């Protein structure tokens, strides 16, 4: 298994590689943010390579403040050139390959046709000069390198043109954007996959160009961003002369990508299709963070009531209702109502199917799952928030307020996470730092069946009897609320059979987390995964198992 070091792991490209790593289980990734590995410190780099076996180093660490570099030349030089030299030397010493990310700015923009890897460089500013010099020092210090020049990089992470336009587009009615600088936008996730292809396919060493297909101006790019985000912001074109900046930029920097397409046998996506994907991914990231923040605030409201005496009433379906259910629901609504998606919540007024049947995407919420456990004060109650698209869970958040434990997942990313928090006010940034990926259990001699403390009926007992035919030891694990899904997802249980009534808000978030790690929640009526926003919000009986 090849071992891949990614420096500058907290930048937008580093985070994009982290996002896709689960797609490549045959590779082992080691992510080193600049706080853990300072590439400008030669001794620290040498020590890191000596202590960590590395086959490929992907250098995502860089000084990228193009205009600020004009007044911080030494800093840009130290990070971009000296840092690259340190990595190149350590790669050579330890027989590792270096992947260096460079830029279209190494060219002066005077070409009238696309730039090939063989064209002469002529950087116009300090940042561009340091990136060109980094290329030179790598070539001088190691033979095993891939230098990837890219352009107009953007993603849902960090600071970039797409995110800036989206932020300004929500604040300003009309923007002016330069229309005479021509290049090709590059979605960082696309570039991340290409970097991995270099690791897997090992083409000839050298310089390569990569950007998304199509060439446009910054003005065209801004218009495309607003159109895809369904913002009505007006964009007016202006020449570069009307928007002076400290650093001069090339007017034309379109890269010829034919070499990389042939070497890796890849088809490069068009910038428009990648932009659509990026904006959807950004919206999903923002939705996840909104749901996480809502769940924590709701958890705090629940715990204030949990720690004192509270009133209990009985709803029409004979289930209990407490002040905590209502308080949590009010908090969650205040967050989710700021999004563009409608809400189905246990404690909201339920709409007729005709009013919601055309919803493509919606929230499904249980503001306090396990009210009986809350009343018993055993701590096994949760806040459940799920995002549903076309009847399928796309994202799920489960918060356990009494334990300050958070589970979350975006299904298509193929990973679910668990975070032990200090308090209900933990920031998103800190959550991402402490969260750990969870995995279901591997094959075992014991079948651990998770059951409800409140619903261990005859059908469940009969199912457990059938498992004895697998000639394995049977162990019963009792849990309340959606924690049952979490037990299976994190490998503390094998199967969760449910032969008792549940509603969509009881299962949506848990199903999302299970789906992200390859566990299916199968209806016993249809033998298909549970669907959502159905006419009848009552679930059929189901089995949750890998």
Image (cartoon, rainbow, N blue to C red):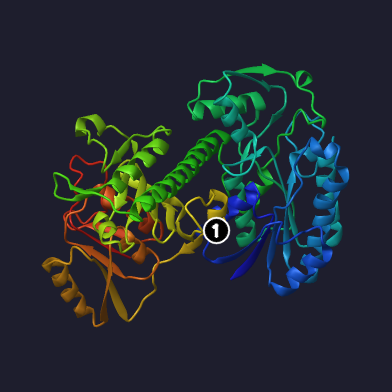
Q: Quadrant of residue 49?
A: bottom right
For the view shown, which residue lies furthest in the front direction?
309
Q: Is residue 422 visible?
A: yes
Closer to the camera in the image, 162 or 338: 338
Seen in the image, is 149 located left or right of residue 264? right
Q: Quadrant of residue 243?
A: top right
Q: Position of residue 57 (x, y in %)?
A: 70, 61
457 to 178, vertically: above or below: below
Seen in the image, is 248 located left or right of residue 357? right
Q: Residue at x 33, y 65 (%)?
A: 546
446 to 247, vertically: above or below: below
Q: Position of residue 51 (x, y in %)?
A: 72, 74
Q: Position of residue 363 (x, y in %)?
A: 34, 41
Number of marks drawn: 1
112 to 379, vertically: above or below: above
Q: Position of residue 10 (x, y in %)?
A: 64, 52
220 to 456, vertically: above or below: above
Q: Residue at x 73, y 61 (%)?
A: 37
How many C-alpha atoms fall within 10 Å of the one at disc 1: few (<14), some, or many (≥20)?
many
Seen in the image, is 133 located left or right of residue 205? right
Question: Which residue, given by chain and number where applicable, does mark 1 sit on?
Answer: 21
Q: Is residue 135 visible?
A: no
Q: Quadrant of residue 114?
A: top right
Closer to the camera in the image, 516 or 486: 486
**SS class, disc 1:** helix
Q: Residue at x 21, y 44 (%)?
A: 537
């Amino acid at each position: 298994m090849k071992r891949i070091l990614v420096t500058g792991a907290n930048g937008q490209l580093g985070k994009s590689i982290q996002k896709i790593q689960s797609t490549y289980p045959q590779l082992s990734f080691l992510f080193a943010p600049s706080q853990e590995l300072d590439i400008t410190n030669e001794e620290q780099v040498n020590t890191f390579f000596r202590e960590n076996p590395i086959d490929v180093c992907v250098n995502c660490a860089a000084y990228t403040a193009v205009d600020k570099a004009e007044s911080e030349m030494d800093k840009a030089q130290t990070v971009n050139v000296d840092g690259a030299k340190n990595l190149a030397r350590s790669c050579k010493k330890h027989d590792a390959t270096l992947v260096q990310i460079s830029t279209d700015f190494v060219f002066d923009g005077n070409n009238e046709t696309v730039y090939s890897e063989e064209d002469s460089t002529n950087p116009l500013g300090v940042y561009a000069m340091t990136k060109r010099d980094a290329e030179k020092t790598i070539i001088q210090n190691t033979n095993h390198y891939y230098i990837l020049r890219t352009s107009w990089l953007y993603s849902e992470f960090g600071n970039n043109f797409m995110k800036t336009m989206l932020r300004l587009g929500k604040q300003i009615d009309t923007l002016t954007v330069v229309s005479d600088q021509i290049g090709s936008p590059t979605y960082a996730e696309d570039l991340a996959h290409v970097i991995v292809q270099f690791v897997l396919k090992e083409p000839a060493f050298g310089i390569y160009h990569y950007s998304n297909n199509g060439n446009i101006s910054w003005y065209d790019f801004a218009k495309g961003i607003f159109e895809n985000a369904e913002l009505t912001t007006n964009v007016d074109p202006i020449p570069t002369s009307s928007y002076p900046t400290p650093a001069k930029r090339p007017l034309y920097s379109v890269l010829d990508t034919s070499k990389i397409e042939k070497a890796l046998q890849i088809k490069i996506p068009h910038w428009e299709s990648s932009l659509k994907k990026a904006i959807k991914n950004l919206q999903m990231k923002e939705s996840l963070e909104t749901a996480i923040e809502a769940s924590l605030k709701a958890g705090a409201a629940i715990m204030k009531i949990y720690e004192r005496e509270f009133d209990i009433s009985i709803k029409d379906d004979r289930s209990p209702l407490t002040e905590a259910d209502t308080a949590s629901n009010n908090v969650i609504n205040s967050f989710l109502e700021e999004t563009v998606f409608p809400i189905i919540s246990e404690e909201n007024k339920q709409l007729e199917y005709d009013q919601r049947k055309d919803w493509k995407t919606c929230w499904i919420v249980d503001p306090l799952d396990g009210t009986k456990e809350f009343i018993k004060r055993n701590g096994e109650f949760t806040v459940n928030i799920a995002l549903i698209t076309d009847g399928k869970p796309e994202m799920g958040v489960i918060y356990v307020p009494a334990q300050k434990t958070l589970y979350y997942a975006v299904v298509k990313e193929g990973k679910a996470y668990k975070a032990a928090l200090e308090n209900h006010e933990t920031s998103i940034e800190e959550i991402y730092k402490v969260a750990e990926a969870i995995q279901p259990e591997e094959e075992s001699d014991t079948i651990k069946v998770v059951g409800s403390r409140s619903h261990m009926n005859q059908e469940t007992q009969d199912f457990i009897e059938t498992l004895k035919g697998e000639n394995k030891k049977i162990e019963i694990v009792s849990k309340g609320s959606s924690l049952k899904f979490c037990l299976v997802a994190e490998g503390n249980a094998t199967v969760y059979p449910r032969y008792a009534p549940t509603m969509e808000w009881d299962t949506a978030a848990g199903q999302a987390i299970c789906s992200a790690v390859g566990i299916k929640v199968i209806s016993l009526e249809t033998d298909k995964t549970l669907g959502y926003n159905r006419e009848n919000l009552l679930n059929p009986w189901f089995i949750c198992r890998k």
